[in-house]
Image (cartoon, rainbow, N blue to C red):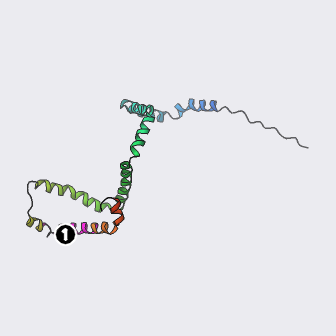
Amino acid sequence: MALPIRFEPAARDARAELRDRLDHAPLEHAEALLAASEVLQGLHERGVLDTLKGALSASDTLVNTVVEAAKTPEAIRTVRNLLLLSKVLGEIEPELLDVVVRAIPEGLAQISAKRSETPGLFSLLQKFRSQDSRRAMGAAGELLESVGRNLKPSALTEAGLRG
């Protein structure tokens, strides 16, 4: 009958392996280590490392302060509103938003140029005759109609807009 072959794996010294890898690392990764040390030096010169060190030492106080500020109803509404606004911005075609964004400074410049003048009723009515004004009022009307269609009386009551 055959006898079993005894196999005993060589004992592995994890620390020695790590030390060996660490000894060879400067040679194998010299460029990366130099780049990392330059980044660290730049962070140190600008005080970023000191700021991080201070934040770490005051981490409990910092976390408690942030948590207390984030628990307020205003902060919760702010985060929810920012998420909703990001969704709205994602739905808008960039070309349309570009037109609106470019038109705003132009309109503000016209307003500031005529700031001292109070427009009369007749001049306002003449503005409504232009195609550009009617196009903008049409777009605003469509937007208002859509908002009105989606507003439910319960939403108005919750927002405190209806008595």
State the image coordinates of residue 30 (x, y, percent, origin top left).
49, 33
Q: Left or right: 9 with respect to 47?
A: right
Quadrant of the rendered image containing residue 86: bottom left
Residue 83 seen from this side: yes
Q: Left or right: 59 with respect to 120?
A: right
Q: Which is the main secondary structure of the residues drawn in magenta? A: helix
> Which residue is drawn at the image coordinates 47% and 35% (left, top)?
31
Query: In this rendering, is residue 72 above or below 146?
Result: above
160 and 105: which is toward the camera: 160
> Which residue is drawn at the image coordinates 18% and 58% (left, top)?
107
Q: What residue does disc 1 label?
A: 134
Q: Quadrant of the C terminus?
A: bottom left
Specify the segment rendered in magenta: 127-143
Q: Left or right: 107 with respect to 36?
A: left
Query: In this rendering, is residue 29 above or below 72?
Result: above
44 and 160: which is toward the camera: 160
Query: In this rendering, is residue 88 above or below 67?
Result: below
State the image coordinates of residue 53 (x, y, percent, origin top left).
43, 31
The count of marks equals 1
Other-residue count near label 1 (Cα within 10 Å), few / some / many at <14 / 14–19 / ≥20: few
Residue 92 seen from this side: no
State the image coordinates of residue 9 (x, y, percent, origin top left).
74, 36
Q: Secondary structure at mark 1?
A: helix
70 and 120: which is toward the camera: 70
89 and 38: which is toward the camera: 89
Residue 91: in magenta span: no
Quadrant of the rendered image containing residue 123: bottom left
Q: Quadrant of the N terminus?
A: top right
